[in-house]
Amino acid sequence: MEKPFRYIGTKRRAKESPRFVTGQGRFVADIHVPGMKHVAIVASPHPSARIVSIDSAAARAMPGVRYILDGQEFCAHTDSLYVGVDAPKVTRYALAKDVVRYSGEWVVAVVADSRAQAEDAAELVEVEYEAMPHVIDPERSLLPDAPLLHPDHGSNRLYHRKFVWGPVEEAFAQAEERLAFRVTWGRSSTVPIETFGVLAQWHESDRLLDVWASIQMPKYPDQLARALRLPGNAVRVHYDVDVGGSFGLKRGIKHTVLVSYLARRIGAPVRFIEDRLENMRGGDMHGPDRFFDIEVAFNRDGLVKGLRMRAVDDVGAYAGRSPLQLGKPVSAICGPYQIPAIEYEPTSVMTNKTPQEAVRGFGQAPTNLALERTMDRVARHLDMDPIELRRRNFIRSDQFPYLIPSGSTYDSGDYHAVLDKALAGIDYPALLRQRDSLRAQGALAGIGIATCLEPSGGNSAFEPLFNAKNDTTTWMDSCLVRVDLSGAITGVMGTSSAGQGHETLVATVLGEVLEREPDNIRVVHADSLNALPSNSPVGSRMAIMLGGAAAGAARKIKATLIALAAHNLGCAVDDIEYAEGSASVRGDPGKMLSWDKLVEIAHRKFHLLPPGMEPGLQAGFVWEVPTGGGLPTADGRVQIYPCYSFEAHVVLIEIDPETGRPKILKYLCGHDCGVMINPDIVHGMTYGGIAHGIGAALYEKFAYTEEGELASGTLMDYLIPSSMEVPELHIVDHCTPSPLTTFGQKGSGESGYLGSAAAVCNAVNDALAPMGRSIETLPMSHLAIWNTIRPT
Amino acid sequence: MKAAPFEYVRAESLDHACQMLALRGEEAKLIAGGQSLVPMLAMRLLAPAWLVNIHGLAELQEISVVQDQLVIGAAVRQCVADADPQVKQSVPLLSKALHWVGHAATRNRGTVGGSLAHADPSAELALAAALLDATLSLKSARGIRQVAAGDFLVGPMMTCLEPDECLVDARFPIWREDRSGCAFEEISARHGDFAIVSAAAQLGVDQAGVCTRAALGIGGAGPMARAFSDLARRLVGTRLEEALLREVAQEAAAQLEPTGDLQASAAYRRHLAAVLAKRALLGARRELVLSP
């Protein structure tokens, strides 16, 4: 019988909360270095053009101006940013050279004593352009006559492959029914309140670059050093900077290379904090923009036998890591369902739009939308209850570990139980009555269900699938634990946090293992030269990976304390009983050494140390992601994420039949992420994720005009739902522990978002069903809904 | 998003503000709550050489009832107008319109006069002023003049204000019908956003239930808020039958020439105009039925 948890899973205030609630957060804009200069950007007004000339004489003469940089100089002295797929000719720099490829692309950087002065001067930089043909529609971009964004690459296609996992042809030949349709996920993103910001300072005498940034990015210092042609130890990234929201996309590597180059070039610290206009047009932070052509084969009993999913994703004008957002879904390609045969054909295409960046779920939310629309369309085709259809297709709790066709094994789950809990939590029979009574009154009303997975643990084993030249299989994380002479505990992590509560996570885990009060444990973010390796909080991994690393380090400390005690109490290690930091001899509680005593021995009494033991008391633990380390098979099967959280959304929506305006009346999410380390943090993430998905479903879109202009480049046009649009949200927890992790935890950093857009879309479609209409494109704006329901 | 350089002066009196405008002319811009102006400055859509702040001027802060008019000083904050019992009692439509203006946070700073002078085609206060036929007082060093709201609003973000003029107050007629009711309807992408379309109506009836006075207006569906006084007059003398109200709403919408944008096509706007005008008329009628 395992001991019950002492701190894990209990309702405790997050360690970070007092700092943020009292306005004591330390964000990049709070960091001031004497002599700091400021950057403003001159951006391209064209989606595609040749740069004929740049005249910056008038700007240079403006007060306070220190430097004006263009792409010719910048590209000559730095290297291209990293490309995630095998497309070496799709180079990418912070400043355009010779041509611009999207409206908003950075052309010139102006450095001045103040940001206002930099903007004054930027207005006077005269860039002469010669417009060239552009392409905005991803399907047109794939045609042979489309204008090429990167002619040296030879095509606008960045990646294409057709995976066939299982007997797809047979499944389609034998199935009793088939359906085909298209689903489209609109170009939305996460739009944190804090835009990206970075401050860089070059110390010429030490040949060292200091960087403070609002960053969430794996291998950021490494990529920065490479682009700047510096050794890795010449870059010191300070991770003790609070990040004001990220949700995946705070990856300002281009911003950082630019500012770092400028800081070194002019010999002064340089800061760039994007304003909202720069952020939305030129910050390269748009999210997946994807359509799916779905074919599904199924029998009349509702069992899905085969699925063909063609996914075309428009990454914008440059590659980066964004094509890989088609890769993560490979790890949960069949969702929570037993679908034995799957064909997946991802295509990544470039257009003259702002580039895409990683967004919460890394491409899984659009895929979940496609899967959940598939389940609802199958149910409707068979006139079957969509809940019953899901129950029939779910993987059963007795089938875990469950190997899916694309090669990943799901760790654990009980999908039937979570769905049942969600339906009970919302009182589903009453919800049906409410929907039907609204319909009887003339309203359009619908219920949406979505049952989705959150692959977690951040093992990016899809990278070798998308780039055969990349055989990375290591996705470690780590933690260092120190106990000082006073007996106080400090946990050291090597990455920054964007509101995920890592300090609470580490303190709770250390407290749990060492049986010490977490409130008294300090957690610090080491800079990149002092830190153990980390892959940063991506892919819903930190509860698993940082939590596991913290536990591993704490267990080493505990083992050291036990060995110390055994040596000094004259007994075997196995005879020591450890409780709340003290060690006693089992059966002889009088023979005991307290925490303080043990710590004192470790730090000050070498003569009492067992032979060979290191003095002091600290331990580091680096571990590889569970189930990680494997390369794909020739037919593209690979174990990717270790853990799979599950969520079951139920939503009731009402649509005004005269105006098309939707209103969410009720919302509940059943959620199973295994053992929750801090329930408030999990729930907070889930609430935010649901709201984010509601935005993707109904409001948010980076829309482009045919002329290639971003039409929603401000928060007046890019519509983030507010508390007036997001209804009261309810969460029902369930716990199926993961057998692969330290405490049974799974990831939850993307929870809510992975199913809420699908649930809302299903609800809208349920509302439209009595009219015989449907809508398969997000966002479902008022206008789009009205266009669907208006009399023809 | 930093404003271009400008000079700033805090006006010590209304006369001082008018002197500054006379001196600086088109180079100067008045600022009160700044809820529209400051973002426009930050985005450099405007770059006035001078900003003249009139927010603190006591002369522009009064709310009073003078005979059959509610007089609201131009620099009265929207939240103050919203909380003022005189406003609610004498011109309830204005209270209803205020609820749709931006968010609580912007209403805390934004002023009634600022919204009118900004003349956004979808502005709720402009719609209320147009349909109730409010009178606006404009002052300059040359003197003071009164203009009807319908003449004040001349186009999208355009008014008849001369460069040296300051909006001083807005005077809303107080209806003294036996019974009256009003309604304000709006649809926006999110609560607090600029209206895609808004519509408002106010109806008055005598003891016998016969309409004695009527007003109808639609905002957001054309270059400026528009009152339909001819159509509204058709309601006078009737018993406000539902079919008639629907017909008037349809006709009002048919007279509009809306444009399309990201949030709404022209056809959608015209359709919404008819729906919301109908709802406003029916809502106003329902209110007078319910009132004692």
Image (cartoon, rainbow, N blue to C red):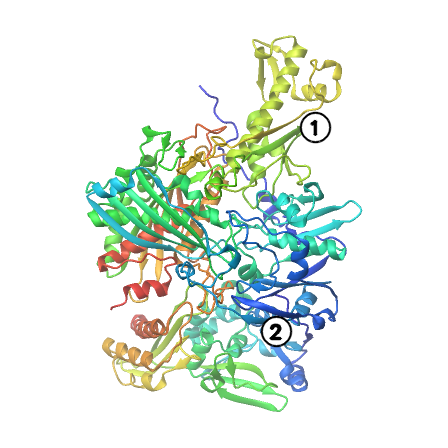
Q: Where is residue A627 in the image (x, y as percent from the top left)?
A: 47, 30
At a point 31% along the width and 60% down the height, the residue shown is A655
Residue type beneath disc 1: Asp
Q: What element carries label 1?
A: loop
Q: In which quarter of the image is residue B50?
A: bottom right
Q: Which chain carries label 1?
A: A
Q: In which quarter of the image is residue A791?
A: bottom left
Q: Can residue A615 be seen in this view?
A: yes
- Label 2 – label 1 distance at C-alpha: 58 Å
Front-most of B267 and A777?
A: A777
Q: Where is residue A297 in the image (x, y as percent from the top left)?
A: 25, 44
- Look at the image and tell me in which quarter the C terminus of chain A lies: bottom left
Q: Where is residue B87 in the image (x, y as percent from the top left)?
A: 47, 74
The dot on residue B55 is 2
The dot on residue A388 is none
Up/down of A538 relative to A588, above or below: below
* A427 to the left or right of A382: right
- Look at the image and tell me in which quarter the N terminus of chain A lies: top left
At a point 61% along the width and 86% down the height, the residue shown is B164
* Crowd class of label 1 (few under 14; some 14 to 19; many from 20; radius 10 Å): some
**Dots 2 and 1 on the same chain:** no
* A686 to the left or right of B141: left
Q: Can residue B174 be seen in this view?
A: no
Residue type beneath disc 2: His
The dot on residue A484 is 1
